[in-house]
Image (tube, helix red, strand yellow):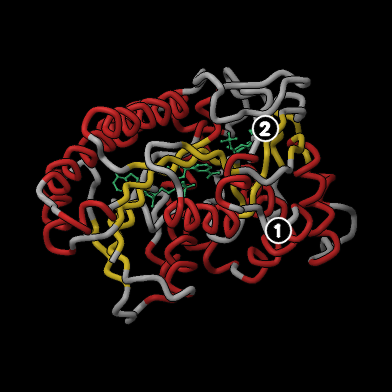
Amino acid sequence: MILVTGGAGFIGSNFVLDWLAAGGEPVVNLDKLTYAGNRENLRALDGDARHLFVHGDIGDAQLVAGLLERHQPRALLNFAAESHVDRSIHAPGTFIETNVVGTFRLLEAVRAWWGGLQGAPREGFRFLHVSTDEVYGSLAPADPAFTEQHQYEPNSPYSASKAASDHLVRAYHHTYGLPVVTTNCSNNYGPYHFPEKLIPLMIVNALAGKPLPVYGDGRQVRDWLYVGDHCSAIRRVLEAGRLGETYNVGGWNEKPNIEIVQVVCALLDELRPRVGGGSYADQLTYVKDRPGHDRRYAIDARKIQRELGWRPAETFETGIRKTVQWYLENGDWVQRVQSGAYRDWIATHYAPA
Ligand code: NAD
Ligand code: TYD
């Protein structure tokens, strides 16, 4: 079996669903259920004996040690993290707690357990750390895309905490021989994406008749990857990634934020025309920029293609259409994740200056 952490979040839940749908081994899913974790994402697995959900913290050494002893996983995939840049600017503490200290404690628990293994289980074990392209910092418009050799230059508390976790993972391989592999992926989008991030926030606000808040001039560039493609990249790296290596994962899809918002509006205009006419783009509004806002991320994903034969299956056009359709069909999910805590965040963060 495999142990997944953070498997009730956006990418983790997509991964667990895809993994089991593809006939993968049973999953033990350890998740703290923060505001971003949602058991409902995993509802399709209710009653499925191949999925065991455990409510807990990656920083709880005793709990993790017990899970490793009891289940003897052949791999651990670490998705658990605080993941929202804006929240890391408002309140960085939890990012240090989970992304740095939590990852450290997780590594320690794994090191202690793995150190006692012998033979094939020891040789075959993998610790796969899921990370982000944001650790590399920001690019100027004409700079080449990030390769795995790019210097780490994190700019937000979020990316700094992820960079720290990547360094710890690297050090546990170098110092203790722990069989690790790390992925650094660009911005994901798709089903179960919490509506605090750009794409789901725009869909949800548009449908609710609310403003579509674009930070600064809207010309910041991100590389976008459909979440199912990220999951297939992780499966491939788990299968054949070289130990101690990092693999950049990206969609070859660099786009300025304003274009993303316009595409979302155009799709909504087509699929759910506005009552009373006009375009959802009429709701677009420019708001104060994010402090320290990274201008551009771009991923050079040639290494994973060359070494492991992975390429994304979706184009941005196919992926974003599926995503908008998913949100249109899953209004109940959206309503339920918009709890009191979500409303408080929106009210604080988007309050008029
Ligand atoms: P998310 O915020 O949607 O989900 C995070 C999950 O981790 C939640 O279910 C939460 O409850 C859980 N969690 C948080 N703290 C925990 C703790 N201490 N112990 C156990 N569980 C805890 O995040 P996501 O977008 O699914 O991202 C997953 C991973 O992928 C993160 O490590 C993130 O840095 C990385 N990543 C995300 C993106 C993206 O575009 N979303 C891109 C590249 C990499
Ligand atoms: P986000 O989805 O928060 O991801 P990240 O900051 O990790 O890239 O934001 C994506 C881009 O969209 C980023 O440049 C910030 C911008 N953005 C807005 O313009 N308005 C918003 O309301 C949000 C949430 C993001």
Task: Tell which circle, 2 or 1, labels the residue nearer the N-terminal end.
Answer: 2
Quadrant of res 244:
top left
Give the residue drawn at x 40%, y 39%. 82
Which residue was labeled with disc 2?
A: 298
Disc ID at residue 314: 1
How far from the left and from the top, in percent, is residue 35?
39, 49
Q: Secondary structure at mark 1?
A: loop
Label 2 C-beta lies within 8 Å of the nearest ligand 2 atom: no
Quick one: label 2, few (<14), some, or many (20+) residues within 10 Å? many
Comparing 345 with 228, the one in front is 228
Ligand 2 quarter of the rendering: top right
Q: Secondary structure at mark 2?
A: loop
Disc ID at residue 108: none
- The residue lying furthest to the front in this view is 119
Evaluate if marks 2 and 1 touch, with contact meaning CB atoms under 8 Å apart. no
Comparing 149 with 269, the one in front is 149
Is residue 302 placed above or below 12 in the rendered structure? above
Quadrant of res 339:
bottom left
Direction from residue 15 to residue 220 in the image, left or right = right
Give the residue drawn at x 20%, y 45%. 110
Direction from residue 350 to residue 174 in the image, left or right = left
